[in-house]
Image (cartoon, rainbow, N blue to C red):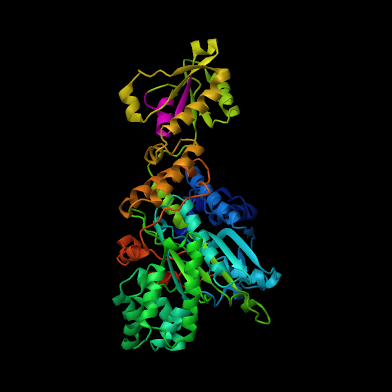
Amino acid sequence: RLPSFRSSASSGGGVEEAQLRAALKCSSGGAAELLAGVEAALERLGSGGARRTPKIAKGTRDFGPDQMKVRSGAFASIREVFDKHGAVEIDTPVFELKETLMGKYGEDTKLIYDLADQGGELLALRYDLTVPFARFLAMHSVGNIKRFHIAKVYRRDNPQLARGRYREFYQCDFDVAGTYLPMVADAEVVTVAVEILRSLPIGSFMVKLNHRVILDAIFELCGVPANKFRAICSAVDKLDKEPWSEVRREMVEDKGLPAANADAIGKIVTQFSGEPRETWKRLMEAGVFKGHQKAREALADLEKLWDYLDAMGSLKFVSFDLSLARGLDYYTGLIYECVHTAEGGPGVGSIAAGGRYDGLVGMFNQGGAKVPCVGVSIGVERIFAILEANQRGKANSKVQAFVASVGKGMLVQRMSTAKALWDAGVSAEFWQHKESPKFAGPNSQLEYALANGIPVVVIVGENEAKRGVVKVKALKSKEEEDESGDSDQGTEVGLADLGGYVNALLEKGSSASSSFGAAAASSGSAPRPALAAAFNSASSAAASAPLSEHTAFDEARVAIGMGLLMQGCVAPPPIVPSPVPPPQVAAKTAAKPSAKAAAADDDDDMDLGFDDEEEEEEAKPAA
């Protein structure tokens, strides 16, 4: 049977034929010993073997300390916005009955992870947080509720890690369920998305917004059969990634829609997008929905929405775009998608999305009673991809002071000095790898502090220790330190006064960076109060700046915001929102996406259609 064992080993078991032969040879003393030897060899074979190289599952990733700093800061900022709007937190199981999830996601149903039979129940990993929330509402009858949910979801998607597209990823959902005045909850949900994205240092973005009733009315008026609405909707949803010619080809050749009907759709969805009120006015004047009562009611609701969003300070970020489709089956009203528009980003595409889904809860009620719901899902993994791209190559330490020593046997003195800084509320660390490390030069204490962007070094020397003092030096960049040489030896400070002196030095360094450009340059280490002030200064200045200067202000806000996140801080709550370019301008830019943006699909509860045969093959059902 050695050939079969050899085959098993070569397929990944890690146990070679020679190992099995050795086991059999050692157990030649009798049948019991022989059996024990074979069982031991097979046990090693089944466990993967000692030589097997560790591997992580496709579409997943590990996170190191630097990445977790960014993630923790971002999650804290998102939670702060949720709390500010009075939302309560819930949680649901990571897996649901398969029947709960099926038939809710259109073409993306094939991305659901099935689980093996568990005692008679057919289960699946949750695809998003929206359907489990609808099931939660149907079971618990909670009435009106603002809820948020931060948890992992799972999709058998084709991963693109650089663009934040994974098989296991976090979603941050905010939903309002229950009866409220028309469009009031919708306006607040869109505003929550805007506030979250403005609180994170990701640069400019745009909220594309449409209404599912208006979209269905377009299909109806253009002669699309009712049973093809969702299929054609899925094709239209690709207009942000593909040219109209390709979308038209899909409608005609793949979906079986007559060419004349496809052309009629194209004349509407490609011509109406831009600033909400102006686009709404053009649509009304064109009389596209003159004889369609439901569409005119939806347009009346949108007119209210513009006023509510304006009152909440969010309208300036919105583009009314009839090409936005959102392919998920459960949407019944307003739909929206937040798109990252900053130049030089990783090309992640959509970073948040959502809409109204009034009929979803009724699918779980025996009586079919509807519960009005509207929500948004923040694509945090894609946001993290942007944050990591912004932070790449920058110092990641949030330590404010590094305790170094000159001389031999100074480990205990370094410890006691660090303790004095900790007691004063200063984030500090000391060299722990050698008892008597080098102060300067390669692999030295000073090189470590400079490489990690630590702004202050506290130097403990033998003579200074006898006198109860230390030297405190504000560090510059490595290049500036090399130029200054030994001219700046630091200031002598008594141990009793050390904490106060270092805090004052940090504040002084931050005050010197009070302009947002300088604060951005030192954002990795400056104290939070000054960074927060600089962040708001950049926002305020951008609010009154000419359009041509918005990019510079956004870059400053991104750099300062990254400094806050790297210190584990939440971005300052009351932010004066700096306007992005008017949606009609941004929409023209978005109409010609970069190669990276064109390849990026939606995430969260966003539509994730496949584009090639290889991906179709990847999505075959598997338990």
Residue at horizontal 31 percent and vertical 88 percent from the top: 260
Residue 221: within the magenta? no
Asked if 410 appears above or below 149 in the picture, the reply is above
- The quadrant of the image that shows the C terminus is bottom right
In the image, 606: left or right of 272?
right
Q: What stretch is highlighted in magenta?
A: 441-459
User: In the rendering, at what x and y percent does residue 49 appear?
Assistant: 52, 51
Query: For residue 84, what is the image quadrant?
Result: bottom right
In the image, 261: left or right of 59?
left
User: In the rendering, at what x and y percent does residue 61 appear?
Assistant: 48, 53
Residue at horizontal 58 percent and vertical 31 percent from the top: 425
Question: 566 or 266, which lies in front?
Answer: 266
Residue at horizontal 50 percent and vertical 27 percent from the top: 504
Q: How many marks?
A: 0
Asked if 147 appears above or below 453 in the picture, the reply is below
Q: Can residue 369 be seen by looking at this rendering?
A: yes
User: In the rendering, at what x and y percent does residue 73 appear?
Assistant: 52, 47
User: In the rendering, at what x and y percent does residue 1 appear?
Assistant: 51, 62
Question: 267 or 113, which lies in front?
Answer: 267
Question: 330 or 317, which lies in front?
Answer: 317
Q: Can residue 432 be seen by looking at this rendering?
A: no
In the image, 451: left or right of 365?
left
In the image, 113: left or right of 345?
right
Question: 617 or 178, which lies in front?
Answer: 178
Asked if 575 appears above or below 97 in the picture, the reply is above
